[in-house]
DNA sequence: CCTCACAAAACTGTCAACACTTCGAGCTCT
DNA sequence: AGAGCTCGAAGTGTTGACAGTTTTGTGAGG
């Protein structure tokens, strides 16, 4: 049970949040809580309870909830309250298709626009095996020099990916297969071969999708 | 006792809006107003003024503004208010790159997943010349059978496209060039050729991007 | 004439209180 | 006992008011 020691006052202060306004702080804390899995998927959100928990009034909380609604992290229906979005295998598959398209384009642009320093950093990331997958993909997105693409990949899609995988951004060792695929992508970027970079990235995402779908199917078979 | 309710007030009623809550109605009206260009890009939003205009209190209005912020239709900074986002040539170029990736993927999926009826509808759209471009692209997105892709293309990206082009979803005659490109895309889908469908769609988007960038550059040269 | 300081107006952020809806416990009737 | 109704409790939607900040307008001084 994740219940705190103190019974009556679960009031959590918000000192570490960067946002100036309470609504922003609550938004940051709430999105992090949802993505970290602290709030169960599909669970109903009680505005008074959450407001007490975070030590704010319902006004800022509702503003944060509306932002989360637009980010599709919660669903809201009038007079029926808000619920944490529940990940589904279908949504996961859809997400990977979108990622394949966007990250493929990012790799294509990176092959053209990346600086020598950035390519060196990518090469270093691949050569040392202990890095996490996200760092690699984020770095390539940055190399695309396309802020909208970067925002989609590193913001919205990455959030949904965290939610669907149900893991707290873990640095788990990636497979040998992924290691090889990463190396091929970097090689293509080093060669400034845009077509090949896109193709390798798309194969990499498709491969990751199949692995993850298999793992998810096995999890659901157990449950 | 200066009641200005009925005389010359700018108070706009919200009868036609579908949403049950005031916040939703204001959200719909505001996003439509921004996308239609009724609110000047870059203009500052005064919460009291807008609240009076729409005949609601500041609470629901602020909730709608937070949703618009997450949709990137407005920008907000603490204690400094909200501003309508200002389109830039750079953002337009970025948008077309993202569209090229996503619509290419949609065409690929459509070649695989579209039903015979849907393909017939696409063929009809191409054969009759008077259709507008958006209808064609939306239909292909629907054929992808990927709700997340459909939501991105028909929702967020389409909104930004409307905003950046500054036109009210006009049914303007498309060029002969676009007509030919549409026909090639539909032919590839009819042949169930996923690779070709994606390539033709990406060329079509890239061609549209170059035409629009040229038009925008000319406009800015005049001004 | 320009600049700076200062006060007032306006605005944003926040809160507590008020309507209306929804849900559930308990009662009634068959 | 079980189905349906009633009424109270809880929750959501909305409002107006209050506190702190930013901006504006004004006047003195250089």
Image: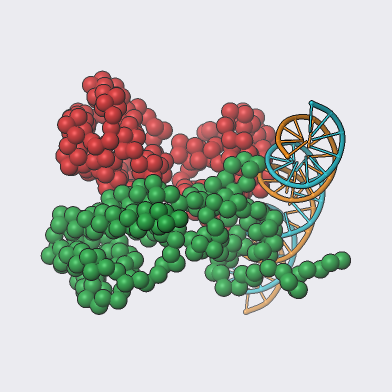
Chain colours: A red, B green, C orange, D cyan
> Viewer-proximal residue, A71 or B102?
B102
Q: Nearer the viewer, residue A121 or D28?
A: D28
The residue located at (41%, 33%) in the rendering is: A168
Image check: B141 left or right of C10? Answer: left
Residue B54 appears in the figure = yes
The image position of residue A79, as x and y in percent, is 60, 60
Which image quarter: residue A4? top right
Side (left or right) of D16 relative to B43: right
Quarter of the image that includes the C terminus of chain B: bottom left
On screen, residue B136 versus residue A62, left or right, reads left
Q: Residue at horizontal 33%, vertical 31%?
A: A139
Look at the picture and state if B23 lies above or below D27.
below
Q: Residue at horizontal 39%, vertical 41%?
A: A147
Percent x, y for residue C28?
A: 71, 72
Asked whether residue A209 appears in the rendered view, the answer is: no
Residue drawn where x is 43% and y is 49% of the image: B88
Q: Quadrant of residue D16?
A: bottom right
**Above-or-below relation of A165 to B199:** above
Question: Residue C1 placed where, x, y %?
Answer: 73, 39
From the viewer's side, name the closer residue of A52 and B89. B89
């Amino acid at each position: 049970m994740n219940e705190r020691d103190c019974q009556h006052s679960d009031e959590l202060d918000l000192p570490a949040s960067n946002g100036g306004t309470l609504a922003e702080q609550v938004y940051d804390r709430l999105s992090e809580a949802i993505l970290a899995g602290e709030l169960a998927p599909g669970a109903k959100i009680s505005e008074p309870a959450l407001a007490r928990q975070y030590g704010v009034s319902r006004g800022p909380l509702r503003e944060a909830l509306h932002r989360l609604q637009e980010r599709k992290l919660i669903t809201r229906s009038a007079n029926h309250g808000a619920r944490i979005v529940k990940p589904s295998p279908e949504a996961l598959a859809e997400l990977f298709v979108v990622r394949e398209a966007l990250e493929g384009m990012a790799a294509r642009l990176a092959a053209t626009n990346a600086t020598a320093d950035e390519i060196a950093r990518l090469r270093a990331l691949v050569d040392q095996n202990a890095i996490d997958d996200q760092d690699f993909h984020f770095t390539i997105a940055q190399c695309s020099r396309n802020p909208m693409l970067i925002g989609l990949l590193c913001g919205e899609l990455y959030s949904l990916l965290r939610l669907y995988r149900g893991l707290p951004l873990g640095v788990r060792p990636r497979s040998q297969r992924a290691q090889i695929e990463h190396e091929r992508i970097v090689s293509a970027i080093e060669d400034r071969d845009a077509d090949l970079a896109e193709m390798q990235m798309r194969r990499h995402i498709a491969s990751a999708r199949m692995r993850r779908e298999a793992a998810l199917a096995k999890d659901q078979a157990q449950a």
